[in-house]
Amino acid sequence: MKMIRMLYLSLVVVFTLAVTGTVQAASPVFDVDHDFYPYYPSLIKWNKSSVPFNSPDVCGGCHAKQFREWNGSVHSLAFKDPIYQGELNKGIKAVGHDISRQCEGCHTPVGMITGEIKGAGNSGLSDMAISGVSCDVCHSVSGVTHWQTPSHEPENGSFILTSGVESKDGQTFIKRGPFKPTDYCGGGFHKCVESGLHLQADLCASCHQVYHYDGHFPLEASYLEWKHGPYAQKAILCQDCHMVDIPTFKRSADQFVKPERKEYRHYFSGANYLLSYLAAGAARKSGDEELAKSLMNQYEMEVERLKSAADLEITPIRRDGRLAELKVRVKNIRAGHNLPTSLTNVRQMWLEITAKDESGKVIMSSGTLKPDGSMPDDARLFNSDGMGNDFHFAVDPWVVTSFSRHDTIPPRGYKDVHYSVHAPEGVSTVSIEARLRFRQADQKVAEALLAAVPKDIDLERIYGLKAVPPLPVVDMVVKQVTFDAGKE
Ligand code: HEC
Ligand code: HEC
Ligand code: HEC
Ligand code: HEC
Ligand code: HEC
């Protein structure tokens, strides 16, 4: 037995070596130019100079309004985010340190290119590194290399950073933005360059197309979903829904009207209310009431955004005059990309349906969470399942190289779900309650990620978390209707 087992093991080793060998050789489909992309697997390029990047505090000294709006955004939390830190820590242990360049390239680009960050954890890092996707990241983007990437699509941070220029007279900071510069632009601190890129979705694309670090499979594809949908056709960009307040976002989405220049805000408001809520708790604990307020403002915008993204339409289907089925149409009415988008194999959006007879007795139900917070088998989920090279189910982004199921709803599109409901004899009306529900992750997945945070992030001390509580669920849409059960 033992011999056979050893033989088997050595075969596995030989086989694994052979497979890794072929992976390391250039793929004919996704050829990587390592000289062009020196930070591979991150595809950032840096016009390296001695001109430093400045932390948001410095920019905030003159741009107080933009700073207040950005501070508390998910971009400001992109590196501190404990869920990110847990996953980063797991990734480094599973793949090795090199993979961290890929992650950090989007979650804290300057911390990555300067080589400051050595692994997961926050201790001892500069403000610039800790500040994630900060002012001087976006406003130093001088170009993109979307078409030179291995997939020939925007992926894994395919932008170019230029903080300024150095000459014999010294260093000059150059910041790129939407305006034609005036003489006083930069207040003597920086020069300004007008940048058309900042008025395009391509600026966001490099980071909002997350690809497998080496397989170049699109794990998160908000940009391409948008590009291939009706909002791109009508030039309603990421900025027009995410860099404005909620009423303005609804107007962009409903009327395809672009916001006026003065309506843009640096909120980058999305859907991650769990992160904003956790961070607000941490800010309160550290005594920073102003930041806590800004985070709760983000939390409210995120919940409001989710509640305005979708709609439900319930139609009874009768057979021989008797109620036999319900058709529930789930419509994506305001998301510029698929619903949900991005981390679709982790986010959960599902239908919960309850049908009752006139006495209040439940005659059919589906999608009700179990008491321990886990998803019931009968739930109709709109998200995706990741699959590894072995074609088995997987969650971690360094394993997932395809999807075995991808069931999200395209922009302005819909999906129909059919439920059979048989009204028992004697029942004359059936009341239906349908909810479209959302949470950031499955309870077990969130628990595993938070359990993996590096040692210097003490969840109890920083966030006041002793254990992971049941993840909060947002009801995006709730509809109640009563139908006649029909003839018996
Ligand atoms: C994720 C990228 C991103 C980050 C981070 C970011 N900006 Fe911007 N910023 C933009 C874009 C895009 C515009 C253009 C918006 C528009 O269409 O008017 C802009 C516009 C501006 C403008 C022009 C005036 C205005 O508000 O439209 C200033 C000034 C500015 N940003 C400063 C900052 C400062 C200061 C920070 C950090 C506190 C910051 N930005 C962070 C992308 C970013
Ligand atoms: C191309 C840019 C990019 C790369 C590379 C990238 N991410 Fe992200 N990551 C994002 C964006 C954008 C989101 C937000 C998606 C969303 O909200 O659905 C995100 C979200 C996450 C989240 C969810 C955070 C939360 O609070 O729910 C985790 C965890 C995460 N990333 C971990 C990683 C790890 C680990 C790596 C490296 C193996 C990595 N990311 C590489 C851009 C990137
Ligand atoms: C000493 C004050 C000062 C500091 C510090 C400062 N700026 Fe500015 N910046 C200005 C002034 C003045 C303008 C002109 C427009 C305005 O008043 O908003 C400007 C304009 C801008 C614009 C718009 C440029 C355009 O052409 O559209 C951006 C973007 C910008 N700054 C980014 C930054 C970033 C990023 C930082 C930090 C690295 C920063 N600024 C630091 C004073 C400053
Ligand atoms: C027409 C308005 C609209 C446009 C345009 C739009 N979005 Fe969104 N976005 C939404 C809405 C509504 C949600 C919340 C529902 C959802 O998660 O899909 C959202 C959510 C998101 C999320 C959060 C996903 C999560 O699960 O946490 C990200 C990331 C995002 N958008 C990125 C982008 C990017 C990048 C672009 C441009 C390529 C873009 N969006 C264009 C409306 C828009
Ligand atoms: C340098 C990379 C980078 C760029 C450029 C960038 N983002 Fe992001 N963005 C991220 C990362 C990373 C996250 C997720 C952080 C996390 O969840 O920990 C994120 C999160 C977001 C979210 C919140 C998602 C949620 O789950 O709530 C929105 C909305 C968003 N970005 C919009 C934009 C828009 C609009 C632009 C272009 C103007 C843009 N981003 C450009 C890296 C970037």
Image: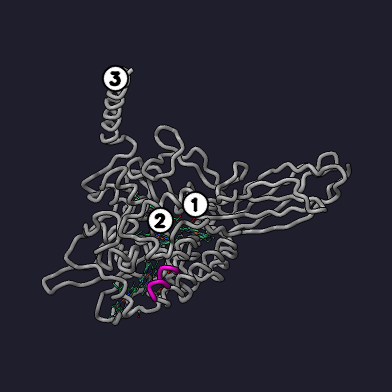
Residue 138 appears in the figure: no
Which residue reaches farthest left? 168
405 or 337, which lies in front?
A: 405
Sort mark 2 into few (<14), some (14-19) or many (20+) by Cα contacts within 10 Å.
Answer: some
Q: Is residue 198 left or right of residue 483?
A: left
Disc 2 CB within 8 Å of nearest ligand 2 atom = yes
The residue carrying pointer 3 sits among few (fewer than 14), some (14 to 19) or many (20 or more) residues within 10 Å by Cα, namely: few
Magenta highlight: main SS: helix
141 or 56, nearer to the observer: 56
Q: Are marks 1 and 3 in contact (CB under 8 Å)?
A: no
Image check: 296 left or right of 401?
right
Amino acid type shown at disc 1: Ala
Q: Badge 1: how crowded within 10 Å, few (<14), some, or many (20+)? A: many
At label 2, which amino acid type do we have? Ile
For this orientation, the residue located farthest to the front is 466
At label 3, the amino acid type is Leu
Where 233 falls versus 380 (above or below)?
A: below
Of the image marks 1 and 2, the number of the one nearer the N terminus: 2
Label 3 to label 2: alpha-carbon separation: 41 Å
Q: Measured from the top left, where is residue 175 in percent x and y?
A: 29, 70
Secondary structure type for disc 1: loop
Q: Quadrant of residue 157?
A: bottom left
Rendered view: 124 above or below 421? below
Q: Are marks 1 and 2 in contact (CB under 8 Å)?
A: yes
Which numbered tag is attached to residue 229?
none
Determine which quarter of the picture holds residue 121: bottom left
Residue topped by disc 3: 7
The span shown in magenta is: 281-287
Q: Which residue is mark 2?
A: 83
**Residue holding disc 1:** 441
Tell me which numbered mark, 1 or 3, is placed earlier along the sequence. 3
Residue at 77% from the left image edge and 44% from the top image edge? 317
